[in-house]
Amino acid sequence: TFSPSEYTFDSLFIKNKDKFILANGTYSKNEKDQLTLSMKDLNLNGITEFIKLPAEPEGLIEGNIILRNENDNPYILSDLEVDTLKVNDVLLGSTTILARWEDETNSIQLDARSKIDQFELVNVSGDYKPGEGMLNFNIRLNNLELATFERYTSKIATGLDGLCTAQLTLDGSVNKPELNGTIFFHKGSAILNYLNTRYHFSDNVRIYRNIFFFEDFMV
């Protein structure tokens, strides 16, 4: 059943060979309600056709998602695995995304990791308080391909190449997030569109309150 502020599914099951999605429960403004989505081997390409994302993920996803509401703030809990995740055509590998509710702090505890074999490329951990909209995350990137970010820099620079390693924190609120930390570029290069010239760099960039500081940055 559907209404402008409530969605209810009674064991809706959609299956195609080994792939399936099961929807059960209610999503509404009532904090006691929850909608559970269970899925197996769903292609992320198909899901992102319906959901606008600032990235292009690929891979097969399986696990569970729970949709709930806290103080008129919607939030998502999850226990998901993605087989061979790609983002913007860059391989991130086997990925797990765990988001669990913590009663004592009224927050969502997030732990997301991507690795190829035993090498971890991405690690995001921390918590989000939906009632207050507050963020508290640690982000680690290890030898991640710069090409991952080219879709976001294409108006300024293209042909991104090389690797980056980063230690970052994301704090503040959803409406006013604050990014801090350091990014190290290893054998990086990019073409600046305005000059149509490729530049090479291996140096650090410091981020403080969302501002990037290229102090003594060597190109």
Image: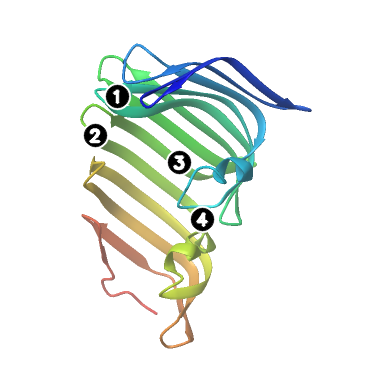
Work out whether mark 4 precedes mark 2 in sequence or the reverse, and give the earlier one. Answer: 2
User: Depth check: 48 or 215 in front?
Assistant: 48
Q: Is residue 13 above or below residue 121?
A: above
Image side of residue 145 versus residue 45, left or right = left
What residue appears at the point 72 percent right and 25 percent down from the top-left corner?
Answer: 15
Work out whether mark 3 precedes mark 4 in sequence or the reverse, and give the earlier one. Answer: 3
Work out whether mark 2 precedes mark 1 in sequence or the reverse, and give the earlier one. Answer: 1
Residues at marks 2 and 1, CA–CA distance in whole angstroms: 10 Å
The residue type indicated by label 1 comes to Ser
Work out whether mark 3 precedes mark 2 in sequence or the reverse, and give the earlier one. Answer: 3
Residues at marks 4 and 2, CA–CA distance in whole angstroms: 31 Å
Residues at marks 3 and 4, CA–CA distance in whole angstroms: 12 Å
Q: Is residue 44 above or below residue 54?
A: above
For discs 3 and 1, the disc positioned in front in the rendered view? 1
Q: Position of residue 6 (x, y in %)?
A: 39, 21
Work out whether mark 1 precedes mark 4 in sequence or the reverse, and give the earlier one. Answer: 1
Q: Which residue lies under the disc numbered 2?
A: 133
Q: Which residue lies under the disc numbered 1?
A: 107
Marker disc for residue 123: 3
Q: Is residue 42 visible?
A: yes
The residue type indicated by label 2 comes to Gly
The residue type indicated by label 3 comes to Asn
